[in-house]
Every structure is written in C-alpha cells, then in structure tokens.
Image: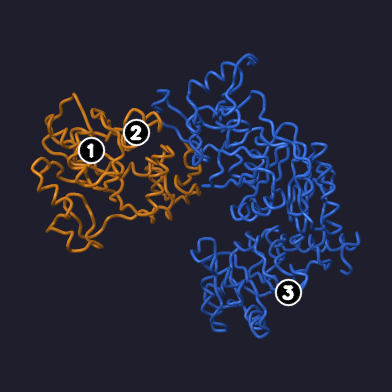
Chain colours: A blue, B orange
C-alpha cells in the first residue's frame, strides 16, 4: 500500500508496533485507530495462517505439522477456522486472524558514541573472535562463533554489541533458557549503562518496551518481525534437531532484511560442522579456555551390561570404584545417567558409600537447592540427568557418564558434559570417564572434537602444551 | 481404508505419540481413536469414594463439619433457601479440579485451544446417554467474551460429544463471579435470561463447578420456563 505522507501517525503506536507482529487483541489501541493507520499505509495486516500445497502453515511460528493444527466453529467469522496449537500459549493464531505489523517510518534509536564501559581484557583467542564479530556487524554478515566450554563467550560479544549500538542499531541476544536471560541482563546493563535494555521471558514485565538492546528467550522472538539489525543466538546446540527448524524460522522473522546474525555455540551440530569445513558458513573458533590449559579428554571405560545391573539396583563394579575413590579423595563429582528412572534405582546403593549423595533432575522441586548444596560443598557427589549438562559451573569436579552410548548422550551433550571439568584456572583439569557397554559414534565424535580443539589451540599458541 | 491404521496418533495434551494398542479385533471393529496418552490420562483424577449426593463434592478430605448427612454443607444451605430448594437435583463432574486439570482447562478456555474438548467427549457422551435429558443447554458467555474467545467452551463440550446444543440462555450480567462473596452470589440479580420454553428433564453444561451458584441461577430460569428436573455435567469439581 502507498504511504500517505500527509497522514499524522500516532508516535505511540509507532513505538509500540515497530518491529513487532501482534494479534489484534494484544494491541492496546482502538481498532479504529489501527485501521486508520492501515488505510494510510502505516500498518500491515499479515495472514495468521497460510495454505501451502493444501497444508497449513503458521506465519508466526512457522509450524506446518498437521497434528499441531486444530479446527473449530469460529464465532468471529462464522466459519470453520483452523488454528495453530504450537504457539497457542502466545494467543491463538487462526485462519481469520491477522498479525499486525508496523510498516510506516521506523522508530529511530539515538546513536550513542561510546556505549561500552568495560575495563576487562580479552585472551588472544577471544580478541580474535571479537574482531571478527565487529567486522560482521559492520558488513551485515552472518558469523558462527564456535567457542569451547569455558572460553568466555559473553565478553567476546561486548565490542560487537557496542559497535552496533553506537550506530543506533537495534540488538537482540536470544537464548533458549530463562536462567540465562536472568543472568545476562544485569551483566549487560552494567557494561552498557546508558542503553535501554529489555529483558524478555515468559511472564516478564518488559514485554512492550522498545529497547536498543533486547535480551530474550528464543520463544519470545515470535512476537518480533523485522526488528533487529544485530541478532545473536546463544547456545544453538541446545536445540534438538526438530526444534532447530522452528528456531531458524523465528530468527529469520525477527531480524531485519539487512542485518547481521551471530550464532554462539560450543558444539555445532554435524550439519553445521560440515558447512564450516566446506566454507559454506563463515565461522571463528575459540579453541582454548582463557586459562591456557587444554581441555580434559574423556576416558572410555567398558562396564558391561550396566542397564540390566541398574534394573536390579546394582552398579557395575568399576563405576562404584570410581565413586569410592572420589569420596576417599574428597573430590566433588557429577555422575550422569540416561534417565530419571534408572538413576533413582541406584541412589540407595550410592548412599552406602556416602549418605550425602544426592540426585537431581528437571522436574525435581528441590533442583535449585540441590545445586546450591553442591556449590557449598555440602554434597560431594551429585547424580544427575542431562539437565546439568550445560550452564552450571563447579570449579573443581570430576565427571562420569553411566551408559554413555545411550542415544540421549549426543555428541554435543557429551562435549558439554566434558566441558564441566577444569573450568577454573586454579583447577584446570580433571577426570572425565564415559562408562559404556559398547562405544557409540557420538562418543568417538565427541572425543575427536575436543582433541581437535586442543590441537588447534596449540597450533595457534593459545595453550602451552597438549 | 488402510490409511487410518498407519496414521500417527498424537496426545492432545502433551503432543507425544500415542503408542497404538492395535489388536486383531481392531482390524474388524474400528475402535475410537485415542486422543490422550496413558501418562496424561492418569493425571486426570476421578472423584472416588463418598461424596455429596447433589454436587459430587468428595467427602474424603472434607471436615465432618462441612457434611450434612448425604449433602455437603453448601448444597445443604442451598436446599434451605426456598427459592433454590430442589432446583438442581444432580451434578456430575468428570474429574476433580487438580493442578493438572486447572492448567488444561485454562488452556482450553482462555487460550482457546478448542480441540481439547475432544478429551472429554466420550465421557460426556456416555453420561448424557445414561441421564437422557430432553435438552442440553450450555452456560452462555457474554457477547464480548464469546467474541474474544471465538467459541463457547460449554457448548463445544456438547457438540464434540455429538449432541445438539440448545442455546436458549443469554447472559445479561457479565461481571466476574469469582470476586463475589457467597451472600452476593445467592442474592445476585438474575444473570441469565431466556424467551424460550422447555419441558421435562433439562441438562446444563459448564466447565467447572465451584460454588454451584452459576448452575443454580441458570436452573432457576429454566424451572421458570417449564423444566421439571434439572441436572448438570461439568468437567471439573472445584
């Protein structure tokens, strides 16, 4: 639609709708006013659902799986309406509903000459990645930052974000987990003290804030449309393959046509690794931790038919021995299990070695308390499911995986689990043992990935020995 | 014809695949498609044991003070009110209103996930066939509310169970019930209105039975236009 330049648009509506895609019911302005803006070419209505090759597709979340659509006799349009069940928790997108977007002149952000106030220094590896990132921002390019666990990814972002903000660009940092949003928000507010920062997650208050820097869960991206000049997606590897597709859709919707897209990961999936190697995806690695010691490599230990032993509430002898020796040396450890059920079967046996051994899993109501007890050194050994595979840091621990060949322990999960060890410069190494009943491809690939990173780091002079 | 057998079936609640329990009998007698997986089904709690003969409130965790013979204290008090005595003879609630059902109903009615009505369809169908009402009437929504949601959640339960919904009640008062005290609720000016006539046994459908005042107000209107006996079905007993 042609824009009527004589039309007096409402600046509040402009601020509210810029870079968004919202349902009519989510807009706190009168229908008449929104409609007026539409008639004058300032607001766009996009279909909520589209029919593609006789299949429905949700324009908000990209879902096109038929079992995620429902049908109902709609009072609004008087017809059988289809609707997307995948993103329904953000309000129902149905055949007769539209996504409302702003298409008038974009809301300007003030440019800030020196937004970054940070006195820290970067390691050599970090500095290299940081420079690449700044260049990607300047040239509106995409970049994958492949940084080992504990490399210090967040600091690497500072200069790039600062460059974007200094030019009045809008930046978004998206991550799959609310915990991470909560952890990053104060850190970024501190280093960008004069910048408006919105922190978005399910139930947060900043929902309608127009900010220069948005820190959000990836789920919240569904409310944005062509909003960001710089889009950073943290922990891309945290997504299972199927969820990856919906993430990619949300990211493409939320970024501007001309923008730079930065992915951060410690373990890119196989497809991405291939794309990196063949030159189809531009990337930069940080192969070493800031403390200049190599990553500890996992040891593979055969432990027989662990599954049948666990079912009978018994443990392979070498697993028990491994745990005993940690207790004797008073060394903290995490032991990973493929599922809650099998883990719970072993707890009574573990407690014969040490009564203070605990278990934790995703639905555990005491999850936070148990992790805290581990931090306080009240717990020596914590049995866990993959829930603790990432994000948690205990300075001096050993790690074991029981049943490492199970499907749930993907290459990326195993690299992440190994990455729990040796995080601090005081204790830069530790023991990682994969107990198995036959090695899996994922185990071998995880080993190779870690080994490869160490060799690369040595070659580049980022560590002093391998 | 063969297609249906190999179609994947997904749980309406958790979206997981439902493991098919295909037996030889199913090849000849097409079974009804399961809509909820076993794990989710076990989280829906039926109301077992001794309960109020009118509203189905369970006596299991209820202090004796709130029991009056076969009735709960609430129903007993309704029966003391001359205007409401015998107005609702029986309520049947499918499940108790636990946290799981609370979230499910919230998603159904506030998020507008219509297809969740199918979860309750076969149970409601069974009960309607057993109780044999002449009319099945949904508790109405205000015009504003129904436009917002796109459908009436009580009516959807009737339609999905395969029956005709008799939409003869309208709402003339749309203030939120939950913010009122009990006395307010009883002496509330009538919220429902109708111009129709009915006879015989009438069934009212609602999503949740909390205090019973909504159902009783509707029942009173229906009694005034010719109903002999009024019963009700709700998904949950709060």
Report the residue marked by disc 2.
B152
Above/below status of B153 relative to A372: above
Q: Are marks 3 and 1 on the same chain?
A: no
Above/below status of A140 relative to B143: below
Above/below status of A253 relative to B75: above
For the residues bearing labels 2 and 3, Cβ distance under 8 angstroms? no
Q: Position of residue A269 (x, y in %)?
A: 72, 51
Badge 3: residue crowd in 10 Å (few <14, some 14–19, many ≥20): some
Direction bottom: furthest residue: A328
Q: Position of residue B197 (x, y in %)?
A: 15, 26
Rendered residue at 52%/41% (across/down): A86
Where disc 2 sits, the SS reads loop
Report the residue marked by disc 3.
A431
Pick the front one: A256 or A197: A197
Where disc 3 sits, the SS reads loop
* Total number of numbered discs in the rendering: 3
Pick the front one: A442 or A13: A13
Q: Are marks 2 and 1 on the same chain?
A: yes
Please state the chain letter of the residue tagged with numbered disc 2 in the rendered image. B
Please state the chain letter of the residue tagged with numbered disc 3 in the rendered image. A
* Mark carried by residue B204: 1
Rendered residue at 37%/40% (across/down): B117
**Rounded to the nearest whole Å, what is the CA distance between mark 3 and mark 1?**
66 Å
Q: Mark 2 or mark 1: name the one nearer the start of the chain.
A: 2
Badge 1: residue crowd in 10 Å (few <14, some 14–19, many ≥20): many
**Rounded to the nearest whole Å, what is the CA distance between mark 2 and mark 1?**
14 Å
């Amino acid at each position: 639609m042609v824009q009527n330049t004589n039309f007096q648009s409402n600046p509040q509506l402009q601020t509210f709708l810029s870079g968004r895609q919202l349902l009519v019911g989510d807009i706190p302005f009168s229908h008449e006013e929104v409609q007026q803006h539409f008639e004058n070419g300032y607001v766009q209505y996009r279909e909520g659902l589209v029919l593609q090759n006789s299949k429905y597709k949700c324009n908000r979340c990209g879902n096109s799986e038929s079992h995620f659509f429902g049908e109902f006799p709609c009072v609004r349009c008087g017809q059988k309406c289809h609707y997307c069940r995948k993103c329904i928790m953000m309000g129902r997108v149905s055949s007769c509903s539209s996504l409302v977007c702003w298409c008038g002149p974009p809301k300007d952000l003030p440019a800030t000459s020196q937004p970054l106030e940070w006195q820290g220094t970067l390691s050599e590896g970090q500095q290299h990645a940081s420079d690449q990132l700044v260049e990607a921002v300047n040239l509106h390019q995409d970049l994958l930052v492949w940084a080992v666990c504990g490399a210090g990814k967040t600091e690497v972002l500072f200069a790039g974000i600062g460059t974007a903000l200094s030019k009045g660009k809008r930046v978004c940092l998206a991550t799959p987990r609310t915990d991470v949003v909560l952890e990053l928000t104060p850190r970024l507010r501190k280093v960008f003290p004069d910048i408006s920062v919105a922190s978005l997650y399910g139930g947060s208050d900043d929902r309608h804030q127009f900010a220069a820097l948005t820190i959000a869960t990836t789920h919240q991206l569904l409310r944005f449309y062509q909003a960001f000049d710089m889009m950073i997606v943290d922990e891309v590897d945290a997504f299972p393959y199927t969820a990856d597709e919906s993430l990619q859709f949300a990211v493409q919707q939320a970024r501007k046509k001309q923008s730079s897209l930065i992915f951060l990961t410690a373990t890119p999936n196989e497809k991405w690794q291939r794309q990196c190697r063949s030159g189809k995806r531009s990337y930069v690695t940080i192969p070493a931790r800031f403390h200049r010691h190599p990553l500890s490599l996992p040891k593979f230990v055969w432990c027989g038919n662990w599954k049948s032993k666990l079912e009978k509430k018994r443990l392979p002898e070498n697993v028990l021995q491994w745990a005993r020796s940690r207790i004797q040396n008073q060394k903290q450890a995490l032991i990973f299990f493929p599922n809650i059920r099998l883990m719970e079967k072993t707890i009574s046996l573990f407690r014969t070695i040490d009564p203070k051994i605990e278990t934790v899993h995703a639905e555990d109501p005491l999850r936070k308390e148990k992790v805290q007890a581990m931090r306080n050194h009240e717990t020596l050994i914590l049995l866990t499911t993959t829930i603790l595979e990432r994000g948690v840091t205990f300075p001096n621990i050993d790690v074991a995986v029981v049943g490492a060949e199970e499907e749930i322990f993907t290459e990326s999960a195993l690299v992440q689990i190994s990455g729990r060890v040796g995080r601090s410069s005081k204790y830069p190494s530790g023991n990682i043992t994969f107990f198995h009943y036959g090695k899996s491809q994922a185990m071998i690939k995880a080993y190779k990935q870690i080994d490869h990173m160490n060799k690369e780091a040595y070659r580049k002079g980022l560590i002093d020995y391998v | 014809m063969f297609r249906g057998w190999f179609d994947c079936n997904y749980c309406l609640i958790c979206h997981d695949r439902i493991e098919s329990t295909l037996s030889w009998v199913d090849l000849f007698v097409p079974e009804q498609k399961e809509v909820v997986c076993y794990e989710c089904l076990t989280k829906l709690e039926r109301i077992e044991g001794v309960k109020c003969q009118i509203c189905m409130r369970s006596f299991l965790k209820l202090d004796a003070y709130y029991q009056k013979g076969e009735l709960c204290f609430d129903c007993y008090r309704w029966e003391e009110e001359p205007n409401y005595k015998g107005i609702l003879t029986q309520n049947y609630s499918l499940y108790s209103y636990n946290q799981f059902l609370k979230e499910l109903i919230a998603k159904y009615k506030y998020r507008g996930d219509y297809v969740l009505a199918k979860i309750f369809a076969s149970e409601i169908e069974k009960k309607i066939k057993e109780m044999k009402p002449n009319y099945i009437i949904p508790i109405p929504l205000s015009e504003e509310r129904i436009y917002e949601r796109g459908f009436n959640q009580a009516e959807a339960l009737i339609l999905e169970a395969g029956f005709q919904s008799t939409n003869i009640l309208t709402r003339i008062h749309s203030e939120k019930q939950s913010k009122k005290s009990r006395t307010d609720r009883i002496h509330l000016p009538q919220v429902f209105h109708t111009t129709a006539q009915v006879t015989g046994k009438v069934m009212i459908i609602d999503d949740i039975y909390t205090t019973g005042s909504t159902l009783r107000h509707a029942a009173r209107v229906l009694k005034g236009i010719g109903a002999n006996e009024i019963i009700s079905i709700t998904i949950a007993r709060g």
